[in-house]
Image (tube, coloured by chain):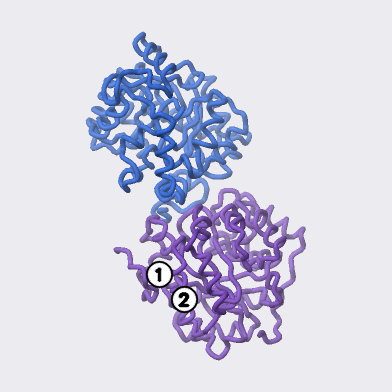
Chain colours: A blue, B purple
Amino acid sequence: MKPNRREFIESATLAIAAGSTLMAQENGSGSIPKRPLGRTGLQVSAIGVGGYHLGSAKDLSEARAIVDAAIDAGINFFDNAWDYHDGGSEEWLGAALKGKRDRVVLMTKVCTHGRDKNVAMQMLEESLRRLQTDHLDVWQIHEVIYDNDPDLIFRPNGAAEALVQAKKDGKVRFVGFTGHKDPSIHLKMLSHDFPFDTVQMPLNCLDATFRSFEQQVLPEVNRRGIAALGMKSMGGSGELVSNGVVTAAEALRYAMSLPVAVTISGMESPDVLRQNLETARGFQPMPPAEMQKLRDRCRFAASDGRFELFKTTKKYDGDVGRKQHGFPDASELPA
Amino acid sequence: MPQPSAIPTRRFGRHDVQISALGFGGHHLGDAPDESTAVRMVHDAIDGGITFFDNCWEYHRGKTEDWMGKGLKGRRDRVFLMTKVCTHGRDKDLALRMLDESLHRLQTDHLDLWQIHGVAFDNDPELFIRKGGAAEALDQAKKDGRARFVGFTGHKHPDIHLKMLATGYPFDSVQMPLNAFDGSFRSFEQKVLPELNRRGIAALGMKPLSGHGDAIKAGVISAEESLRYAMSLPVTTTITGIDKPEILQQNLRVAQNFKAMTAEEMKALRDRVCTEAADGRFELYKLSLKFDNPEARLAHQFPLDMKSVEVQEMVMATDNTGHPFPKPNK
């Protein structure tokens, strides 16, 4: 994907303006800023469409409407995973992107959960077929959330070798990993010094003070020039908002104001997309003092992880990974 | 105190008190088929040489304290009785009300040991030591002579235990999961136990069968190996759940014939199970809410899991003698 002139100017402006108030536009109007995706040379929209929630849309035509409207609004980053809705999310996104594939940065994830390279390569073929494309822009190892996942991924014939192979074959341009559990597991992944292009992690105003990816992982990822992809800006299922800790706009604005390439947000309906666009259009980063104030306000709610259940319970841990790791499935062990 | 018995006794931390190397876990007593079986199990345990009895204010909503109280009637002075308080961050007054209820149910005027239960959330240490927090209740109970010694327990993460120790509170005992899986995974054995030994705090091991014995059912380790490993660590006692007379007899046999594993045997066992230990699959108390009791979840506003056996047993299927907290909506 080559940036056109307008996008290029916007991203250049944003790079200058990040953290300051140089831009005159207000949130809700104007275009969605673009940012460099680490050192890949790609430019991505500051907000991305989360693949799991896309698969929760009413039907394919609604999913298509979300994707169309997102692209029209200037969103070019699309997230997905091999196991979302048993492949349904990838299929819908593939159908919706037909004829528009070259306008987006397409990411999906591989769900080896400790299994070997061959399993990963088979999943890649399935993802490509469902997404109706011959290559991914970004391919990430999904749900690195068990303490021994890094060891399993980097063992001989493990999933890391699949990343190398897929890049060599031209089936993926860039590679990374994601996980929602604990900063220490992310740091263990990084300690292998594998040339990751992207790293995805939960980033929100509660994470800022609790088992904090923002404090422990984000600076390291930035230092290495790896693109940081934020997720769970509202707690995974809107817990921060539904429990009255912050408003949706505050939560998204905080996450987008961090030094990340993109904040991936679940949008299961055109309404949610519209809401997100309110914040993303003409986005102005929060001034540091305001971010600090918000962190302070959220400190108590953050301090036991009650609203970041992906860190403190099994609720967000998928069945594919649980099975590989010998854990009871979600119906037996919901949290 | 104890009659001469075949179960070894050990010193309770820095105090000149001896307790049995095997402790009777209170939660499982509530799983006994009926009250008279429970009472008989308590009697048989004492006759078999067990002197350490564990319990908790919230177990089966008071049922296990009730049953243990009945079992200990006339035998109270032969045992070292512990129960736990379930403030989970809430204040001193609540803790002292729970103490009154526990003493009443256990039919005694004092506890040998009173511990803070379920220190499992990252902010529990701050909430414990805050002004008006549960630490003040421990002080008060000691001063009143209603608790001889005080401590805390938790099953979640060694770092939370270390944070409790860092509050500087003078604990007499600390309880934690200790088993061959813990030996290499988020390890209390490696991170907490040496610190307790250094400070002269009595270390109480629990979950020798790693919770509900899933690893034994999966054939990864035997019950006897598990218990022997836990008892071979430098702990004062190993608390194990006893829910039926056969289990009591089985545990008494292991304890009465106890011979500590050598360091080499222990290492060999840790190594043998290290693959299964590495993702915590057999230590669900460290990784899931499954072992976080309803009272803890309510106090911390975590979701109650109505499918969980613990929640069903403790909130729904038993009488709630443990006011002052309302039952959650079913």
User: Residue drawn at (45%, 64%), measured in percent from left and top?
Assistant: B91
- Asked if badges 1 and 2 are on one and the same chain, I answer yes
A105 to the left or right of A114: left
**How far across and how far down the image is residue A281, in percent?**
30, 24
- Assess whether mark 2 and mark 1 are in contact (beta carbons under 8 angstroms): yes
Task: Identify the mark nearer the N-term, 1 or 2.
Answer: 2
Q: What's the residue at 42%, 64% (across, down)?
A: B295
Q: Chain of mark 2?
A: B
Would you say residue B328 is visible in this rendering? yes
Disc 1 residue type? Glu
- Residue A15, position in %: x, y? 44, 18
Location of residue B9 by image quarter = bottom right
Q: Could you tell me which residue is drawn at 58 percent across and 38 percent down?
A: A150
Q: Which residue is mark 2?
A: B30
Q: Secondary structure at mark 1?
A: helix
Alpha carbon distance from label 1 to label 2: 10 Å
Give the vertical position of A172 relative to A85 (above or below): above
Query: Which residue matches tag 1?
Result: B313
Query: Considering the numbered disc 2 on the image, is that residue within a helix, a strand or a loop?
Result: loop
Residue B293, image x, y percentages: 45, 63
Q: For the residue carrying disc 2, how many other residues have a C-alpha within 10 Å: few (<14), some (14-19), or many (20+)?
A: many
Where's the N terminus of chain B, which quadrant? Answer: bottom right
Q: Nearer the viewer, residue B285 or B276?
A: B285
The residue marked by circle 1 belongs to what chain?
A: B
